[in-house]
Image (cartoon, rainbow, N blue to C red):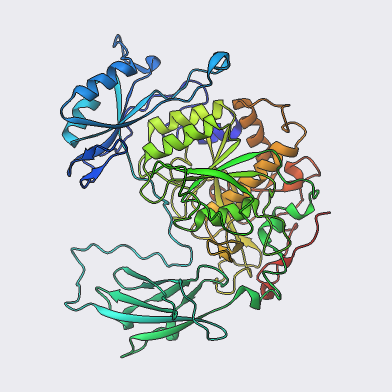
């Protein structure tokens, strides 16, 4: 096991890198769960209201207690099909090569899984059988709180005092030229709960305040789809006594960078990792990356030739992945592999091949398991998991062991809550990434460091393996434009792209020199860790091994002697420089 694996051992639901550890039904699993509304399962069978969705699998032979005999998967499926209190919705079976190639493969750690619907009481009874593993088919989440939105404790509805007639707040969003900005997300942070609306074609958003009035709104947060900096409005800029409307002006990216996006810029993140100092031929050619998120905007000029394909696992369709439901998949795709076409920005590994595996919205652990199987059958080198599970999943931990055995490195954001790292990033078999910020890189960011330079933003949690730039990063947006993006998923995209450069260009990893096995995964993560430098003055529990230095990781040079020396930023330039050729 790698150093990182040992450091994270004991967290989450998995053991080490060999045989899977037994965790039983994960602690805290609630079989009552949130009852499903009547819906059609993936098999077309109706799920009655009040029933929950569950994952059922035979317990592996080495994890059975005492003299309890194993149960074959085929027998378990038959029993489930015959049970009148259970409806089978589908199956997730381990992926194996066909023919003689399968002989050389290790036995899958993850057993075949049935996706079923049943009442919580039936699930509890079935979980009492030591021959089987039963888990809730949990909904996937982002586990994120936007870094520019002040975190307000959620009000208990029992203590809220909703207005008989909810108050209204009208927010008009315009650029510096006073032209309307349609499609902007607008949040009003009140004393009890946030309200949300999207601007129409006139740039106007109409918000309903169920338990606030405009005067009690603490802040407004506005995020345009692309082309502008997001902004937060507080204090006297908010509506005052008797006002129910206000105008928010957002700053265009082109105001900071003349000619942008026609003239390309290089972000502070690439400078921080010294990616501007590696050979121009280092572009990740021949590597494959799966991005597990909400899809990727395949029509973006910088991504249309980079995204090789994908799959929508929620819809069960080879289509649909081309539309990004949240925007975050497109943000990460740009950081990793935006085309080098001398406009906008260029991805770190522009010649890698991206695959968009869509899991949002409405994705569950069962969909994630299918997506990971897809990675196995398609020989994916790197998979970035932009997601979190409310509770640990033993079955998911076993499936990730199978990917590691096949040489696929899994990378995940640590989460944006500012608390503990989210599952599955807690697993020793997943490389978790926290975010790094830098003063002066965002015109609206408050100073959060005692001195100019890099710092850890409040939203990055403890427990990450590495840190990377993840704040005010200019990247692609779903409207064909560009946007500043924040979060640990953006930081993870930097590490995913650097890992692609390692696989393609490092003497010890490129091509077929190192076969696709768990040893390749361990070697890659060891190189990433060995090429980092710590961040003085920061909490080491939140930085992990530190910030990777690209030339050092790639074996091109020795590491810098002091953190912060590889890059500087000019607050007046938003921390960006015009793109220069790699030397």
User: Which percent across, then down, holds residue 196?
Assistant: 36, 70
User: Which percent across, then down, holds residue 107?
Assistant: 49, 17
Please say whether residue 289 is visible from this viewpoint. Answer: yes
Total marks in image: 0
- Residue 551 vertical position relative to residue 252 in the rendered view, above or below: above
Q: Quarter of the image containing the N terminus?
A: top right
Please say whether residue 12 is visible from this viewpoint. Answer: no
Determine whether, in the image, residue 301 is placed left or right of residue 221.
right
Q: Which residue sits furthest right?
A: 583
Q: Quadrant of the rendered structure where residue 5 is?
A: top right
- Rendered residue at 68%/76% (across/down): 572
- Rendered residue at 44%/67% (across/down): 149
User: Which percent across, then down, holds residue 464?
Assistant: 53, 45
Q: Quarter of the image containing the C terminus?
A: bottom right
- Rendered residue at 55%/18% (across/down): 105
- Residue 319 vertical position relative to residue 132 in the rendered view, above or below: below
**Residue closer to the observer: 347 or 536:** 347
Q: Which residue sits furthest bottom?
A: 242
User: Which percent across, then down, holds residue 361?
Assistant: 38, 51
**Residue closer to the observer: 486 or 332:** 332
**Residue closer to the observer: 379 or 216:** 379
- Rendered residue at 66%/38% (across/down): 287
Q: Quadrant of the rendered structure where residue 515 is?
A: top right
């Amino acid at each position: 096991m790698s150093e990182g694996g040992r450091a994270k051992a004991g967290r989450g639901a998995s053991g080490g890198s060999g045989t899977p550890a037994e965790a039983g039904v994960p602690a805290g699993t609630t079989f009552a769960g949130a009852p499903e509304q009547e819906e059609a399962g993936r098999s077309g069978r109706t799920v009655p209201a009040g029933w929950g969705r569950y994952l059922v699998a035979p317990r592996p032979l080495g994890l059975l207690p005492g003299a309890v005999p194993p149960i074959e998967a085929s027998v378990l499926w038959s029993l489930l099909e015959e049970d009148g209190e259970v409806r089978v919705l589908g199956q997730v079976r381990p992926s194996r090569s066909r023919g003689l190639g399968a002989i050389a493969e290790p036995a899958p750690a993850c057993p075949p899984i049935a996706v079923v619907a049943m009442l919580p009481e039936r699930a509890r009874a079935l979980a009492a059988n030591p021959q089987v593993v039963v888990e809730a088919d949990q909904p996937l989440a982002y586990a994120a709180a936007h870094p520019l939105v002040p975190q307000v404790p959620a009000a208990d509805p029992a203590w809220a005092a909703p207005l008989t007639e909810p108050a209204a707040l009208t927010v008009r969003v315009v650029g510096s030229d006073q032209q309307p900005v349609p499609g902007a997300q607008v949040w009003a942070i009140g004393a009890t709960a946030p309200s949300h609306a999207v601007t129409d074609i006139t740039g106007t958003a109409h918000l309903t305040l169920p338990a606030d009035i405009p005067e009690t709104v603490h802040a407004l947060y506005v995020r345009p789809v692309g082309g502008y900096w997001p902004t937060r409005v507080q204090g006297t800029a908010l509506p005052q006594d008797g006002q129910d409307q206000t105008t928010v002006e957002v700053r265009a990216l082109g105001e900071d960078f003349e000619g942008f996006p026609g003239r390309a810029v290089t972000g502070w993140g690439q400078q921080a990792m010294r990616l501007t100092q590696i050979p121009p031929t280092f572009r990740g050619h021949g590597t494959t990356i799966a991005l597990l998120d909400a899809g990727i905007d395949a029509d973006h000029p910088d991504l249309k030739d980079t995204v090789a394909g994908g799959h929508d696992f929620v819809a069960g369709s080879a289509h649909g992945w081309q539309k990004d439901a949240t925007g975050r998949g497109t943000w990460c795709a740009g950081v990793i592999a935006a085309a080098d076409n001398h406009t906008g920005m260029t991805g770190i590994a522009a010649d890698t091949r991206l695959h968009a595996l869509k899991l949002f919205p409405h994705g569950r652990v069962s969909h994630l398991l299918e997506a990971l199987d897809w990675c196995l059958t398609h020989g994916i080198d790197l998979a970035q998991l932009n997601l979190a599970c409310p509770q640990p999943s033993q079955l998911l931990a076993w499936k990730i062991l199978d990917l590691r055995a096949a040489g696929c490195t899994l990378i995940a954001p640590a989460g944006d809550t500012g608390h503990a790292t989210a599952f599955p990033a807690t697993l020793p078999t997943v490389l978790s990434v926290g975010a790094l910020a830098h003063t002066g890189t965002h015109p609206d960011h408050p100073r959060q460091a005692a001195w100019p330079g890099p710092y850890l933003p409040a939203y990055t949690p403890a427990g990450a393996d590495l840190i990377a730039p993840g704040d005010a990063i200019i990247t692609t947006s779903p409207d064909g434009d560009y946007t500043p993006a924040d979060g640990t998923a953006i930081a993870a995209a930097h590490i995913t792209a650097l890992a692609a450069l390692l696989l393609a260009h490092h003497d010890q990893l490129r091509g077929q020199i190192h076969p696709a096995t768990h040893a390749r995964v361990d070697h890659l993560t060891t190189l990433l860790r060995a090429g980092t430098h710590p961040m003085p003055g920061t909490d080491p529990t939140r930085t992990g091994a530190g910030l990777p230095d690209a030339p050092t990781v790639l074996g091109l040079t020795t590491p810098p002697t002091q953190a912060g020396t590889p890059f500087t930023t000019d607050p007046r330039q938003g921390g960006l420089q015009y793109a220069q050729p790699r030397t």
